[in-house]
Amino acid sequence: MAIAVIGTLIGPGQGLWPASLVLIALGAAVGYQLANRVQMTQMPELVAIMHSLVGLAAIIVGFNADIMINTIADIYTANNLVFGAVGADGYTAIGLPQGISDGLSSFGQLIAKKSSVEITILRVELVLGIWIGAVTFTGSIIAYGKLAGKVDTAAKKLPGGHMLNAAAAIGSLVLMFAYLGGAGSWTLILLTLLALFIGYHLIMGIGGADMPVVVSMLNSYSGWAAAAIGFSLGNDLLIVVGALVGSSGAILSYIMCKAMNRSFISVILGGFGGPSGPAAEIEGEQIAIDAAGVAAALNDADSVVIVPGYGMAVAQAQNAVNELTRKLRAAGKEVRFGIHPVAGRLPGHMNVLLAEAKVPYDIVLEMDEINDDLSSTDVVIVIGSNDIVNPAAQDDPNSPIAGMPVLEVWNAKQVFVCKRGQGTGYSGIENPLFFKDNTRMFYGDAKSTIESLLPQID
Amino acid sequence: MAPPSPIRGNHLPPPPPKVKAIAAAKPKPKEKEPTPEEKKAAELAAFKAQTKQQVTLIAVAAALLLAVGLVAPASFMQHFIVFVLSVFIGFQVIWKVAHSLHTPLMSVTNAISSIVILGALIQIGSSSMLITVLAAAGIFMASINIFGGFLVTRRMLAMFQKS
């Protein structure tokens, strides 16, 4: 990548490389500060806001290409030539006379030697680049706002809901054909505004818990935008990298969706499907327990599995959890972590938080690796997670999360749930786990409750 | 404190209907361990189905590629083939990344998608003031991403350690 940037900097037709270097240095300074200051709990926000920058850069590059096409077209007209005219073979463009094209920048020359078919393709590509870039830009800003708590995390739609998005998409398509038909740059600007609106409205309509899918999706879009820009600039490197990033984000989105047993479309259309019937009656009651009780059970246990969720990140409890792990392991107990693919607000978010707290990664296992072992586990501690340990996903066909793969923690001998208070949590789905006979509720802030356990572990 | 171990005994009356409910809810009930032969046959069938699906997919993709090639100019096709191959490689590579490394994967792919900076670098030398100013803004933003993305990825990867 460094080679590519340097090569482009010193390449032919580059008049402003000192200015470029200064700008890169400025960007590097900002990026350095960002990378060093960000806390690992804020990673989802950082990734989201960075996607918006790629989106904006793609919009800019796309518009510049359009401005350049118009400039070149004007030069052709001024010289009484036809832009895009082809020679005797039927497809090679005639181009500008040598004297005129020498005065152009390298980018200008690239566009000036295109045939009319190639110009149309170029226009389609830059429309795609701008459109995807614009959706990525506003979508990422909203995702950032939701992850940082600056925008209400609930799914919100304007009246009209997805019909508005569909209308905006159709409008974009119409504008694209108008633009290709030579209607001028205003169509491109209007199309960009529509795409910005779609990005905003689409992500506003998706709830905070679905953000892992949204962020991976935007990651994918930023890649496709780069690839589309690569096409319009005729740059293979941009195409290759864009396609790699695009497919990477697509795979991550797919994995997240599969982990929730929901289709990609249903996540994007926002909200849970809602119960398909009355929820199964929950018998029993939630029984609370104090730190002494949990500590006693931990001291008796031989094997412990900890299931962290977003609540652990919110409470910044990862260091306390590591301390607890260290003490339990020092006492000769087997301690492992079970990570659900959608735990947290970013794919792999929990793994990074635990790694930062210095939990060794070889005891941090995936859901599939640990589910079969849970029945032989003495104690499971659930910290700040809810839906990913909800037995209703398996038992209650009417549950909105029916069929979602979950960590089967209720099979363990004893389950402790660290939770701030009674309540259904993000998705609003009642969790029968809390009412089971072998479950005890350990209420309080995750960080202080785990810390209160530490002195009592021997 | 700890509930007695035959805890499932307390549930004895409800279970039968419950098991039924599970079977109804789950597409693949895991009630009976299949024999090794059955397992092998199932694996073989799955492999065959998967191969069939893949071959069909590749055939369709090839046909589409040919169809595009019939109408599009050669200069476009050259880039388009590069694109298709990159998507293919991307899928192969990304599937092999461990789940635990998905956050660093996202931050590094974010960093490399700032390769769009090349577009702005090509454009900044233009004679048009507007293009130059816009391209300058693009270079600045993309370089925040490049450096921020790679540095934060390095920071994260350095945290992972074995016991």
Image (cartoon, grey):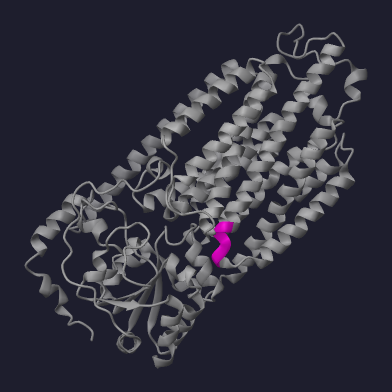
- Give the percent coordinates (x, y) of residue A204: 48, 46
Residue for point 75% across, 23% down: A69
The magenta stretch is A41-45
Q: Taking the image as drawn, is residue A234 in sight?
A: no
As for residue A427 lying within the magenta part, the answer is no
Q: Residue lying at the far right in this picture: please name it.
A: A99
- Give the percent coordinates (x, y) of residue A457: 39, 90
Q: For this rendering, which residue is in front, A358 or A35?
A: A35
- Give the percent coordinates (x, y) of residue A2: 76, 50
Q: For this rendering, which residue is in front, A202 or B159?
A: A202
The secondary structure making up most of the magenta span is helix
**Vertical side of A42 occupied by A63: above or below:** above
Relative side of A376 to A126, left or right: left
Residue for point 20% across, 72% down: A285
Residue for point 80% across, 30% down: A107
Q: Residue lying at the far top in this picture: please name it.
A: A88
**Vertical side of A15 occupied by A25: above or below:** below
